[in-house]
Image (cartoon, grey):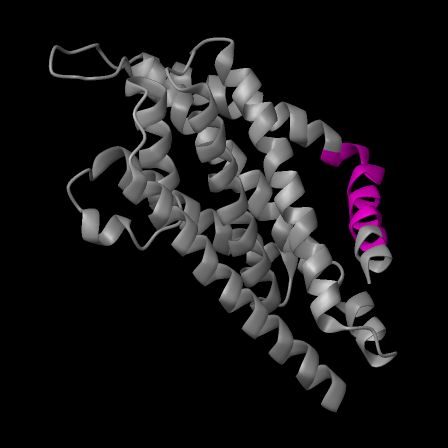
Amino acid sequence: MTNKFVTGVRSHGRAFFRARVNIALLVALPIVMIEGFGRAMGVVPDLPFMEVVPADQGRMLGALFSTAFITGLIGLFQIVSAQQADRRLVRTGFSPGMLLATRLATVAGFGLLVATVSFVVLYRSLSPNAPVIAFVSLALAGITYGLLGVLVGAVVPDELTGSLVLVFIADIDGFLGVGLKNTIAVKTLFPLHYPQTLFESAALDGAVAVENVVGGLVYGGVLVILVVLVFRQTMRVERLA
């Protein structure tokens, strides 16, 4: 079983890196988003009541959203592009649980990789007060969106539609994160609430709020449960068919 798991993860990873455009996006997109967000918000005047320099706020948001969105797309493509192959494997007796485990492990690995790239790019212009926690919160954001991408991919029939769904969710996440600080009840329903709050407190104050760590882990756990239920149902229907 261990050999199958390792082989599956390696196979998914090689399939991703085989396309050079994926490697380019993995490196280029975090740079574009972090610097782009920073420059866009840098034109905002630094007013006395602001706790954070606008350009730094923009770069932090860019790091979060580049990590989240790229990993979300990877999770989506991991499921949608491989559905036919997975279904053939299930028909031949391969365990759906093992297939899903290899997919989730691959997404988590890419979440850590994208978080590393984003953190390195961000660190060039902004040094977090608690770098380890800042990195962990970036990884949490990536893995959370990766799970969301897997869930969307298991429900939505094609990559284009799934990508639009992720863009829509990410846009609302960004809107709530930047402009609506007091709508806590609404924000907690969206994937980036806990990672963003944890990241900002770690980067700016060096503080760690335990409730944000717990909230982020619980949110991720709920996504894992939903992914398992939807994936098993999809594979079961396919077997019956």
Provide residue 180's location: percent of width, then percent of height.
20, 40
Quadrant (top left/top right/bottom left/bottom right) for the C terminus: bottom right
Q: 115 or 73: which is nearer to us? A: 115
Vertical arrangement, residue 139 with respect to residue 35, above or below = below
Provide residue 200's location: percent of width, then percent of height.
33, 27
Vertical arrangement, residue 7 with respect to residue 85, above or below = above
- Side of 177 where 240 appears, left or right: right
Q: Is residue 86 visible?
A: yes
Quadrant (top left/top right/bottom left/bottom right) for the N terminus: bottom right
Q: Is residue 241 visible?
A: no
**Is 20 included in the stretch rendered in magenta?**
yes
Q: 163 or 240: which is nearer to us? A: 240
What residue do we see at 40% from left, 14% from top?
Answer: 39
**Is 186 included in the stretch rendered in magenta?**
no
What range is drawn magenta here? Answer: 7-22
Task: Decide whether the magenta segment is chiefly helix, strand or loop.
Answer: helix
